[in-house]
Amino acid sequence: MVAESSSKLISVTLRVWRQAGPGQAGKFVEYQAANLNPNMSLLEMLDVVNDDLERKGEDPIAFAHDCREGICGTCSLVIDGKPHGPHRGIASCQTYMRSFADGATITIEPFRAKPFPVIKDLISDRSAFDKIQQAGGFITARTGSACDANAIPVPKGAADLAMDAAQCIGCGACVAACKNASAMLFVAAKVSHLGLLPQGQAERDRRVLSMVKTMDEAGFGNCSNQYECSAACPKLISHDFIARMNRDYLGAVVRSAFQPESQAAGGGGA
């Protein structure tokens, strides 16, 4: 049952994961949130709850946020067992209280995965994604200014696919949704974004090999092709990119076996 958008105030019971710090034991704690505007976002609701906790002299709930526009992915939460909440194609900050019935109990917890240790309460450390990005998410081709780069011919099909992959905001919902905590959708999006463009060909092989290696070293699990990742993705990035990355990876492995290391490090592909 979903509450209708109206001026009628609603009240909910929250079950929030509280954890003082990394490696410490945590538990769910219940809070009552009353007289809420159904048109406020879930994060705004947490702000209201925290204001009440601070007035009582209690420790506020720690949660991460930045843009609150579904762009940055910082707000990542598991809401009632689903990364980012009950709706498809939106981030936690775009989940509104009208999505819940008056009197509902809402369970909120952080993204859970071994490579995403909990920092405090609802905040997870997702720096493992930063390390994967740093391993190969860049180009070395000199493209000049923006107008010069735009002068490089790019087939429309490739440009469209690259833009689809580039929508990834690195939130980690794919990892949180996967029973194996696989990061394949994230890595595939980053590999495909640059691998589809002519500017990204110089390190195409090195990119996929380095990023997959870093992903494995970080402790992410294997992909079992059940596609929870794409279902939970707030940008609806297709799992087809995983197949594309697997093809790139296999080609890079084969080429590197027949090339000197210096050439394989920067090898391209068709």
Image (cartoon, rainbow, N blue to C red):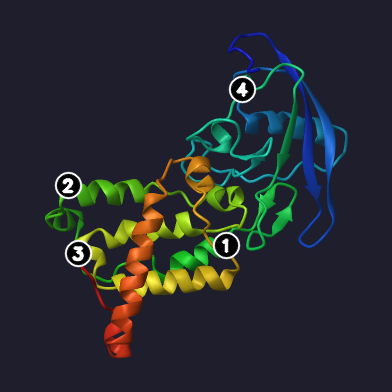
For the residues carrying marks 3 and 4, which lies nearer the camera in this image? 4
Find numbered disc 1 in the image and state the secondary structure of the residue it sits on.
Answer: helix
Residue 254 lies left or right of residue 44; in this view the side is left
The residue carrying mark 1 is 127
Q: Earlier in the sequence, mark 3 or mark 4?
A: 4
Badge 1: residue crowd in 10 Å (few <14, some 14–19, many ≥20):
few
Find numbered disc 3 in the image and state the secondary structure of the residue it sits on.
Answer: loop
Residue 179 lies left or right of residue 235; in this view the side is right
CA gap, disc 2 to disc 1? Answer: 34 Å
Q: Earlier in the sequence, mark 2 or mark 1?
A: 1
Q: In the rendering, at what x and y percent does residue 132 appear?
A: 48, 66
Badge 4: residue crowd in 10 Å (few <14, some 14–19, many ≥20):
some
The residue carrying mark 3 is 143
Q: Amino acid at mark 1?
A: Ser
Q: In the rendering, at what x and y percent does residue 60 appear?
A: 78, 41
Q: Quadrant of the C terminus?
A: bottom left
Q: Earlier in the sequence, mark 3 or mark 1?
A: 1
CA gap, disc 2 to disc 4? Answer: 38 Å
- At x 78%, y 31%, the residue is 14
Q: Amino acid at mark 3?
A: Thr
- The reply to whether residue 265 is visible in this rendering is no
CA gap, disc 3 to disc 4? Answer: 46 Å
CA gap, disc 3 to disc 2? Answer: 19 Å
The residue carrying mark 2 is 156
Q: Are marks 2 and 4 in contact (CB under 8 Å)?
A: no
The residue carrying mark 4 is 99
Find numbered disc 4 in the image and state the secondary structure of the residue it sits on.
Answer: helix
Q: Amino acid at mark 2?
A: Lys
- At x 43%, y 40%, the residue is 236
Residue 97, compared with residue 188, is above or below; it is above
CA gap, disc 1 to disc 4? Answer: 31 Å
